[in-house]
Amino acid sequence: MRTSTRIATLAAGSGLVLACTACSPEAAVYGSDGAAVRAVSNDVIAEVTTSGQYGRVCADASVDLGDPTSWDGLSAGEPEKFDGEQWEEYADLSPTWFINVSQSRPDEGASGREVPAVLFFRGEADDLCIAGVAFGTRVTS
């Protein structure tokens, strides 16, 4: 590699590092909207665990949050834009995002118990509301 090419590559790489110093680690991994989905998901988990409710349910949605104890120990996974190809049975909710939730303490929780598995959101970043929840059966090994 020529010296001028190396300098240009180094300068471009340095700019990327400087540009991302203002980013949160999650925003660097998932983008700012994805990081917002993760943050709101963790807020949903915390609020439902403590109160059994969540204040930002989409206005036209009827969301069953289930038993508040089933949310204990859950954490947000990886957010994805909803494209209708996965989770077709939830397309009528018109979600813009979905995110899996998982047990953050895998050794806890009863096997066979119904727990939230996927959260569906409508909106973007600062304007997310929960449109639905898919439940699954907890399996421990």
Image (tube, rainbow, N blue to C red):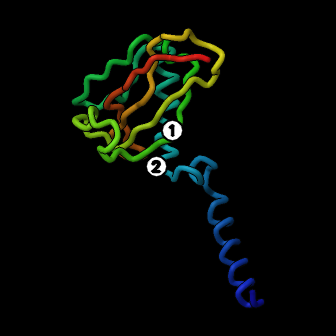
- In this rendering, would 68 be left or right of 15? left
Pick the front one: 102 or 56: 102
Compared to 8, does 52 lie above or below? above
Q: Quadrant of residue 54?
A: top left
Residue on which disc 2 sits: 33
What residue do we see at 26% from left, 23% from top? Answer: 62
- State if disc 2 and disc 1 touch (CB < 8 Å): no
Q: Name the residue furthest right.
A: 3
**Tag 2: residue type?**
Asp
Secondary structure beneath dot 2 equals helix
The type of residue carrying mark 1 is: Arg
Q: Quadrant of the C terminus?
A: top right
Residue 119 lies left or right of residue 71; in this view the side is left
The N terminus, quarter of image: bottom right
Is residue 55 shown above or below 36? above
Q: Residue at x 51, y 53 (%)?
A: 31
How crowded pointer 2 is (Cα within 10 Å; few <14, some 14-19, many 20+) is rated as: many
Depth check: give the residue in front, 63 or 23.
63
Residue 96 circle label: none
Q: Earlier in the sequence, mark 1 or mark 2?
A: 2
Q: Which residue is mark 1?
A: 38
Q: CA distance from mark 1 to mark 2?
A: 9 Å
Residue 124, x across and y down, in percent = 38, 46
Residue 34 position in % (x across, y down): 48, 46
Farthest front residue? 141
Residue pictured at 46% horizontal, 14% vertical? 51
